[in-house]
Image: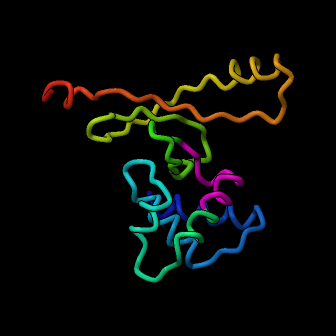
Amino acid sequence: MSNSLVDKSLVHLSEAGLRLTKQRKAMLEVLAKAENPMSAEEAHAELPTSTCDLVTVYRSLEQFERVGVVQLGVRENGTKVYCLSHGHDHHHHLTCRICGRTERVDLCMAEELEKVGRSFGFTELSHVMELFGTCPVCKKEG
């Protein structure tokens, strides 16, 4: 599945006018294999040696997010994390504070949140929402 997801993402990048470089493909492959959303530093560490520098990873991830190939999340400490958009859908994550286990949550209150934002006169709205807690395994061990 990850190869087809990478291929779909490459097509999406091309349609958005971004060049298809070996560095970008390598980054997409790393994200496709990841079990959890990754920070730029974590993605860079998983790339084959000498693929590209960390600045290139940051820039690419920002471009990927802008065109909808990856989705931005935020860890509780404020670190930005990214995951490949499966079919370019929007979702959130539930993350264990102790072990870092992440579950995908297919629930979003974007409509309600955007309505509130518009009521204050804001436009061009976006949001990042993540849930944090203690998973059942860590709760049992604690």
Q: Viewer-proximal residue, 51 or 7?
A: 51
Q: In the picture provided, is 65 more to the left or to the right than 91?
A: right
Q: x and y percent of residue 58 in the render?
A: 58, 63
Residue for point 58% across, 46% down: 72
Q: How many marks?
A: 0
**Quadrant placement of the C terminus:** top left
Tell me how the rendering is colored. rainbow
Residue for point 51% across, 67% down: 27
Residue sticking out furthest to the front: 77
Residue for point 40% across, 59% down: 33
The answer to which image quadrant residue 47 occupies is bottom left
**Quadrant placement of the N terminus:** bottom left
Q: Viewer-proximal residue, 9 or 45?
A: 45
Residue sticking out furthest to the left: 141
The answer to which image quadrant residue 64 occupies is bottom right
Q: x and y percent of residue 12 in the render?
A: 68, 60
Decide: is 42 above or below 107: below
Residue for point 33% across, 34% down: 97
Q: x and y percent of residue 115 in the render?
A: 76, 19
Q: In the picture provided, is 79 more to the left or to the right than 137?
A: right
Decide: is 59 above or below 90: below
The boundaries of the magenta stretch are 61-73
Within the magenta stretch, is there residue 138? no
Q: x and y percent of residue 85 in the render?
A: 56, 49
Q: Viewer-proximal residue, 89 or 120?
A: 120
Q: In the picture provided, is 3 more to the left or to the right than 118?
A: left
Q: In the picture provided, is 58 more to the left or to the right than 46?
A: right
The answer to which image quadrant residue 63 occupies is bottom right
